[in-house]
Image (spheres, rainbow, N blue to C red):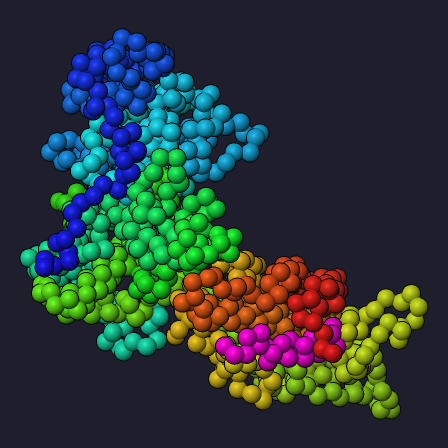
């Protein structure tokens, strides 16, 4: 028996209907094709050197009933005819992309956002280069951005315009319909909409390979870019054109903008391994001899994970990245390959559980494609990296002998169980997370900067450190997927007693992949972000607790009056732990009745409005005393909620790290039961958490955490500012009074922040419980019910908490901050602690 890697042959990823529609032109008799070529409106170069076409004639040509032809000729056939002529036109006419040309029409072309990349695309379309597939992949991206810029320029400023519309929506917009000739718009729709050739989607979603893609459509796309600028606004001066292009370039996404934002888990690495992590796989490959490097790349590109017909494209992509440092060439070539590879794997691992048909691996007519991302339309199509797979209920019911009404709408995506964890984490970060780079969408919709596209091989290759973290992460994730499939094939062959080539990787390369697998974690998944944010907030809270302890440890002394030793009505507040420059305790003097009021308010329980005379407004001391009592009550409730798990069979009970008694070493708790949240058996299920499992308010919770951190840091800074004014003798009476008020407010202020953080922490632990439940049910054929307990109530309380806690930032400004801000914050806190939303999420103890 031959090795497994040699058994399958190439099979197109286009359904018969799509293939028939795409290549119907070539089934026409040669006489019909010749007649079309003789009657079609042609591209021409006018006296100014500007490429043009008579769009009215083109529209008439498309609309005419071809009665003179023996066979039926449709608009797709006519579009093929125009594309083939575009190829001839470019071969005969040298289209210049020279920014130094003086004619005003060319200055408009220079305003195109990606103008500098046009020359590279034109070079790729030459026979010497032969990169026709790549020319179209990049060219259609440039065209889409040019169309959006035209739409943006022509939109009525009064009306709200959509930002970064995708190509399909652009072609249906009234604004663009008014801006370009009807014939041009019709041609664009035939080329790029699903009702026509749908070329952009077929290429970018990985259904076509370079050998299947004709050169002529790349040529036509390039010419359409050059004719589009004619419909721009009036000609700008040359320097103005450069300014416009510079403005557009400044707004573009830069792949390197996420450098430093990716998180790695290096805590378990040795010093030698940590040093090695500073390198990247691309750098390690460069250090290998060329023959060894070529063999390594051949190993990866021939892996079973890589779909047939795409190995050569992937090899050239890796060569461009490793040898020339051309990450954009790598991304444009590798992303369609990766998407289709994942699509095939998605079908393989989910086919039985979700009832998917074999046709899911093919591009279909009148069917949404399964795509790498685009989860905003998940109700319409499968999203390969979404945690859930839409079920074809009828197929599942037939397979299981069940009624289709008993089947669930979705089941767990088995890719989350099968892919290497490091690769899965990286792919989710790069393509699916709202706070991540959204890499594929940025590139294919023309939103990325293409300045460094196709660097010359004569230019000194960039050092690996110059390559973006996103590109390097994608490369290593892709390679690990290839290696994983190679190892799986080797195991299968060993079981079947098949001899396989056991080429091994060089030690440095294998070690680098091992380090990547051990250190890569998810950087932008909301749960992981919440976990890290809570850890950072705990560090800030611990530092603030140490700061607060010094200021709340004070002694009170009556200040004597005149020589008769009568009481002056003043009290000295002495802080033993706070020293002045001469080593003496820091002291403040305040009216005794005011000090007594604060002490009484904070020490007396069950204060009520009945203690106040009718109509008298509560003092600030009374308000913070009341808030302190409410916090006492709620702290008991939430601490009990921490110990009362909703799933005690899955997770041990725990306590909040933010409400830990002072006598317990809270640093040893380190997020208590959550310390192992990012490790072990539930880590894949954590990645599968989504909005319906209770992650819908993650952004709200992140802002609560950030707000609490800012408030703690700024409140501390405010007290230190007051202290400095007193020490330097610059303090006025209002400054001393504000300082003392802040000191009495300090413990209550801190408790409010800690309670807020504990509410977020509790929800994070509930999400961990959900992930544990998912892990326990992962082998079930039916989707487990894994919603977060009281998810609706929890989401409501998080939103109300954010409104409340932001008001406390008003208490932390400079010493000019008004007393009114403090009172408003306390009032809002009291309202929140007595709200129905909080009681629903955390029911009072019986």
Q: Give the range drawn in magenta.
A: 627-650
Please, is residue 128 above or below residue 697 in the view?
A: above
Quadrant occupied by the N terminus: bottom left
The residue closer to the viewer here, 490 or 86, is: 490
Where residue 235 appears, as percent x and y from the top left, is 38, 21
Residue at position x 19%, y 51% in the image: 318
**Residue furthest out toward the front:** 401
**Residue furthest out toward the left:** 291
Residue at position x 42%, y 28% in the image: 171
Q: In this view, does 825 lie to the left or right of 178?
A: right
Residue at position x 68%, y 77% in the image: 637
Quadrant occupied by the C terminus: bottom right
The residue closer to the viewer here, 427 or 90, is: 427
Q: Main secondary structure of the magenta part?
A: helix
Where residue 288 appears, as percent x and y from the top left, is 11, 62
Q: In this view, does 7 lie to the left or right of 801?
A: left
The residue closer to the viewer here, 90 or 764, is: 764
Q: Can residue 634 be seen in this view?
A: yes
Q: In this view, does 339 lie to the left or right of 814?
A: left
Q: Is residue 257 left or right of residue 286?
A: right
Instruction: Tell me the quarter of the picture where residue 620 sits.
Output: bottom right
Please, is residue 589 above or below residue 304 in the view?
A: below
């Amino acid at each position: 028996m031959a090795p497994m890697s040699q058994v399958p042959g190439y099979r197109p990823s286009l359904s018969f209907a799509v293939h028939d529609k795409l290549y119907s032109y070539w089934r026409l008799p040669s006489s019909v094709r010749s007649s079309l070529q003789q009657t079609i409106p042609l591209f021409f170069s006018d006296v100014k050197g500007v490429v043009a076409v008579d769009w009215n004639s083109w529209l008439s040509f498309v609309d005419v009933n071809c009665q003179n032809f023996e066979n039926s000729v449709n608009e797709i056939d006519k579009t093929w005819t125009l594309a083939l002529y575009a190829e001839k036109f470019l071969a005969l006419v040298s289209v210049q992309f020279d920014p130094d040309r003086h004619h005003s029409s060319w200055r408009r072309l220079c305003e195109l956002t990606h103008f500098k990349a046009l020359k590279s695309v034109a070079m790729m379309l030459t026979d010497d280069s032969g990169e026709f597939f790549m020319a179209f992949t990049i060219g259609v991206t440039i065209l889409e951005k040019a169309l959006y810029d035209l739409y943006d320029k022509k939109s009525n400023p009064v009306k709200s315009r959509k930002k970064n519309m995708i190509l399909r929506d652009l072609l249906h917009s009234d604004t663009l319909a008014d801006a370009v000739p009807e014939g041009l718009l019709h041609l664009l729709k035939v080329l790029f909409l699903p009702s026509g050739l749908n070329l952009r989607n077929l290429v970018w979603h990985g259904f076509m390979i370079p050998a299947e893609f004709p050169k002529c459509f790349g040529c036509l796309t390039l010419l359409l870019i050059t004719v589009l600028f004619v419909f721009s606004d009036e000609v700008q001066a040359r320097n103005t054109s450069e300014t416009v292009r510079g403005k557009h370039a400044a707004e573009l996404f830069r792949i390197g903008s996420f450098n430093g934002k990716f998180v790695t888990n290096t805590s378990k690495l040795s010093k030698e391994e940590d040093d090695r992590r500073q390198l990247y796989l691309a750098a390690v490959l460069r250090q290998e001899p060329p023959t060894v490097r070529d063999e390594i790349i051949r190993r990866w590109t021939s892996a079973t994970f890589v779909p047939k017909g795409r190995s050569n494209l992937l090899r050239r992509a890796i060569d461009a990245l490793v040898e020339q440092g051309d990450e954009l060439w790598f991304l444009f070539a590798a992303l369609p390959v990766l998407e289709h590879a994942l699509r095939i794997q998605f079908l393989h691992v989910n086919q039985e559980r979700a009832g998917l048909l074999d046709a899911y691996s093919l591009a279909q007519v009148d069917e949404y494609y399964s795509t790498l991302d685009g989860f905003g339309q998940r109700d319409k199509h499968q999203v390969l990296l979404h945690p859930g797979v839409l079920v074809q209920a009828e197929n599942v019911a037939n397979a299981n002998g069940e009624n289709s009404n008993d089947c669930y709408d979705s089941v767990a995506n088995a890719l989350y169980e099968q892919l290497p964890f490091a690769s899965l984490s990286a792919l989710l970060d790069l393509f699916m997370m709202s706070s991540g780079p959204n890499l594929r969408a940025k590139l294919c919709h023309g939103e990325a900067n293409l300045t460094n596209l196709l660097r010359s091989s004569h230019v000194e290759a960039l050092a690996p450190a110059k390559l973006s973290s996103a590109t390097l992460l994608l490369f290593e994730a892709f390679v690990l997927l290839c290696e994983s499939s190679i190892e799986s094939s080797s195991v299968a062959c060993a079981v079947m007693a098949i001899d396989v080539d056991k080429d091994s990787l060089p030690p440095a390369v294998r070690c680098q992949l091992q380090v990547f697998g051990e250190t890569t974690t998810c950087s932008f998944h909301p749960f992981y972000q919440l976990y890290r944010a809570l850890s950072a907030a705990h560090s800030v809270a611990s530092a603030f607790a140490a700061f607060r302890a010094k200021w709340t440890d004070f002694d009170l002394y009556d200040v004597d009056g005149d020589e008769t030793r009568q009481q002056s009505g003043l009290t000295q507040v002495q802080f033993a732990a706070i020293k002045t420059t001469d080593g003496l305790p820091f002291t403040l003097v305040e009216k005794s009745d005011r000090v007594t009021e604060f002490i009484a308010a904070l020490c007396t329980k069950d204060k009520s409005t009945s203690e106040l005379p009718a109509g008298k407004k509560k003092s600030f001391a009374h308000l913070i005393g009341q808030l302190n009592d409410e916090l006492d009550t709620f702290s008991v409730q939430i601490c009990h909620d921490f110990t009362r798990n909703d799933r005690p069979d899955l997770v041990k009970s725990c306590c909040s790290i933010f409400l830990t008694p002072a006598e317990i070493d809270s640093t040893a708790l380190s997020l208590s039961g959550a310390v192992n949240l990012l490790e072990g058996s539930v880590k894949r299920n954590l990645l599968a958490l989504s909005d319906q499992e209770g992650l819908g308010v993650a952004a709200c919770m992140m802002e609560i955490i950030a707000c609490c951190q800012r408030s703690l840091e700024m409140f501390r800074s405010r007290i230190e500012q007051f202290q400095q004014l007193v020490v330097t003798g610059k303090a006025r009476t209002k400054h001393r009074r504000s300082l003392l008020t802040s000191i009495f407010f300090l413990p209550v202020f801190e408790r409010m922040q800690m309670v807020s953080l504990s509410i977020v922490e509790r929800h994070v632990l509930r999400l961990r419980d959900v992930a544990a439940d998912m892990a326990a049910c992962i082998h079930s054929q039916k989707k487990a019910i894994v919603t977060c307990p009281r998810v609706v109530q929890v989401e409501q309380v998080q939103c109300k908490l954010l409104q409340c806690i932001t008001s406390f930032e008003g208490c932390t400004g400079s010493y000019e901050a008004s007393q009114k801000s403090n009172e408003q914050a306390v009032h809002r806190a009291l309202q929140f602690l007595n709200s129905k939303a909080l009681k629903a999420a955390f029911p009072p103890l019986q």
